Structures are given as C-alpha cells and as structure tokens.
C-alpha cells in the first residue's frame, strides 16, 4: 500500500505541536533564501559583481512582470510577488535533493500561500478604495451578482491552492510509483519534467496573485508608473 | 457494505481520471495547434508565443489535475470507508 499523499506524519513534537517534515523543509528553504539574499546584498556596488548582476536581473524581471500585469508601480508589490515566486520555485525544485519532499506537495503549505494571497487582495482593496467602496465592488455590475462575487473570491483562492498542490504532488507521486515499479535511473525524465512543471507553476501562482491583487486595486485613480531606466 | 464502497471508490477514481483527461487533452491539442499556426506565420515572435503557450498549457492541465486530486481523495481520504 502506497502512503497517502494527503496525509503527513509528524517527525517530532515541539511541546504539544507536532512538527512534520514539510515544516522543517519550509524553514530550511526560508533560512536558505534569507541567507542568500543577505549575502548577495551585503556589498552592493555600481559596478555589479556576478551575484549582484543575477539579482538585479531577477528583480528587474519581477518588476517588469508587475508593470505588465497590474499596470501599477511595482514598489509595493515587489517584495510579496518576488518572495512568493522564489519560495515556490525553490520548494518545487527541492525534490531534486535526495530524501527531501517539496513542502508544496503538501496541501497545508499551499493553503497557507493561497491564504496569504487572499488576505493581501482584501488588504490592498481596502487600502486603495476604503472599506465601503471596496465592499461596493462586490455589487458590480448589479446587486444580483453579490453572491456570485463572494463565491468567486473563495473558489479562486481554493483553485489557486489545489492547482499548485495537485501539480507538485502528482509529480512526486508519479516519480515514487515509477521508482517502486522500475529501476533506479528510470524516473529521471519524469523528474526533468517536474522541474519544468515546478517553474511554470511558480510563475503561474505569482501571475495569478498579481492578477487578483490588481483586480482589487482602484482603477479610477491613475497609477503613476515609474519608468524603468534605460528602456523605452 | 464497506467492501462495496471500496469497489465503487476504485471505479469512481478510474472514471474520474480517464474522463477528466479527455477535455484537457482536446483543449491542449487545440492550443498547441493554434500556437504552431502562429509560429509558422510569425517565427520572429517565437519567444512570446512559446512562453504564453506554456502558461496556457499549465492552466489547461490543471483541469486534469483537479480530477486526479478528486481521484486521490476518493482513494485515500474517503470519508465513507470506516
């Protein structure tokens, strides 16, 4: 009997709280990303080193995507969207390390990420419009749509969660099944496919987060775009 | 009784995955065909087309993944099996 992909067994107990392997991996990835970011931004200079060059390219790409998708200045959203993308990407790719199961292959991590996006959507909607005008957007175009709009908020968060969970989990699941049926090197093409799926899913998750937040923003006040330097 | 539910669950999982794969397969076929058409017309915009194609394919594929999740729920987390 294959172990259920929906269950998670606790690794050890910290007081009354059970700690699962996914939580340990999540914290390891968080520490890794934080240390890498701190090490790369320690000595910033006008003549960039190789690490700074890669970092600048990454930040520039995230900024450009935010400008393209949300039609808003990337200043407020860069940190959230960039962190979401990097965290999901590294989590999805962490299955390459032997013995590590990606935390995004467990539904709890994805639920937490989707809830962050859900909360941020409401936060920015209220911040740019005010409470009453944000609530009034649920009655657009007519008041009949109120239940549908409320349901849509919940279902799209749910589908954000299930999309990431299903894709990553099915990859891990298929690899483990093939490994138990065939030999040692057989699942390598599937793992290569998982790398592609992991990248695309990280991209899709952050793009959808951008779209959801952008839809909640006030579009009547013109957003002042910061023109990126050196581009037309 | 419990045995019957297990048999039906396995059948339901198989049917969910197999029938749930039909729609996304047709959709992905159409998407790839359209992308090939666009690539043949405008080979210079291959980068944009293939990036959009990959994202679109992943979105369509999600429908099949939903069915897989339902099948796994039925198999592993079935609330009716005691």
Image (cartoon, coloured by chain):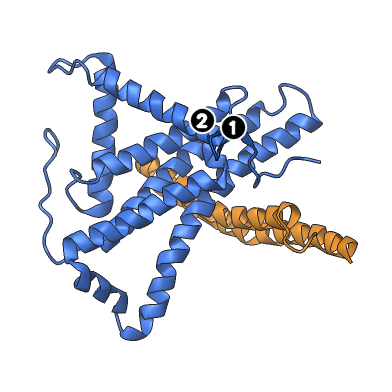
* Residue at the (26%, 39%) spot, across then down: A79
Does residue B9 sit above or below A5 in this rendering? below
* Residue furthest out toward the front: A15
Label placed on residue A25 = 2
Density class for disc 1 (Cα within 10 Å; few <14, some 14-19, many ≥20) is many
Q: For numbered disc 2, what is the local secondary structure?
A: helix
Q: Chain of mark 1?
A: A
- Residue A92: horizontal and vertical position, in percent? 51, 35
* Residue at the (60%, 52%) spot, across then down: B65
> Mark 2 and mark 1: span between their CA atoms?
8 Å
- Going from N to C along the chain, the mark reached first, 2 or 1, is 2
Assess whether mark 1 and mark 2 are in contact (beta carbons under 8 angstroms).
Answer: yes
In this orientation, does residue A95 appear? Answer: yes
For the residue pair A49 and A121, the one nearer the viewer reads as A121
For the residue pair A88 and B51, the one nearer the viewer reads as A88
The nearer-to-camera label among 2 and 1 is: 2
Label placed on residue A101 = 1
- Residue B80: horizontal and vertical position, in percent? 76, 64
* Residue at the (44%, 41%) spot, across then down: A202
> For residue A88, which quarter of the picture?
top left
Q: For numbered disc 1, what is the local secondary structure?
A: loop
Q: Quadrant of the C terminus of chain B?
A: bottom right
Colour chain A appears in:
blue
Q: Chain of mark 2?
A: A
* Residue at the (68%, 55%) spot, across then down: B73
Does residue A223 sit above or below A12 in this rendering? below
- Residue B31: horizontal and vertical position, in percent? 51, 54
Colour chain B appears in:
orange
For the residue pair A28 and B16, the one nearer the viewer reads as A28
């Amino acid at each position: 009997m294959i172990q259920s992909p929906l269950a998670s067994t606790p690794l050890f107990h910290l007081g009354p709280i059970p700690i699962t392997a996914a939580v340990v991996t999540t914290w390891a990835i968080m520490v890794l990303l934080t240390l890498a970011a701190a090490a790369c931004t320690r000595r910033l200079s006008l003549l960039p080193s190789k690490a700074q060059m890669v970092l600048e390219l990454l930040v520039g790409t995230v900024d450009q995507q935010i400008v393209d998708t949300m039609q808003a200045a990337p200043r407020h959203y860069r940190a959230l969207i960039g962190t979401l993308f990097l965290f999901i990407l590294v989590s999805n790719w962490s299955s390459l390390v032997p013995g590590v199961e990606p935390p995004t292959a467990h539904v709890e991590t994805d639920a937490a990420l989707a809830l962050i996006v859900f909360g941020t959507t409401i936060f920015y909607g209220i911040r740019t419009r005010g409470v009453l005008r944000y609530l009034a957007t649920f009655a657009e175009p007519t008041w009949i749509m109120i239940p549908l709009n409320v349901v849509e908020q919940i279902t799209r968060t749910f589908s954000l969660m299930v999309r990431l969970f299903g894709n990553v989990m099915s990859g891990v699941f298929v690899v483990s099944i093939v490994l138990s049926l065939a030999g040692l090197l057989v699942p390598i093409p599937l793992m290569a496919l998982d790398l592609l799926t992991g990248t695309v899913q990280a991209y899709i998750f952050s793009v959808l987060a951008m779209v959801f937040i952008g839809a909640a923003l006030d579009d009547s006040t013109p957003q002042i775009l910061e023109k990126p330097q050196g581009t037309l | 009784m419990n045995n019957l539910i297990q048999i039906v669950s396995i059948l339901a999982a198989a049917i969910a995955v197999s029938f749930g794969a039909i729609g996304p397969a047709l959709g992905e076929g159409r998407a790839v065909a359209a992308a090939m058409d666009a690539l043949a017309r405008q080979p210079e915009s291959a980068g944009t087309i293939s990036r959009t194609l990959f994202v679109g394919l992943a979105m369509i594929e999600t429908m099949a993944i939903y069915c897989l999740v339902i099948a796994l729920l039925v198999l592993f987390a079935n609330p009716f099996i005691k």
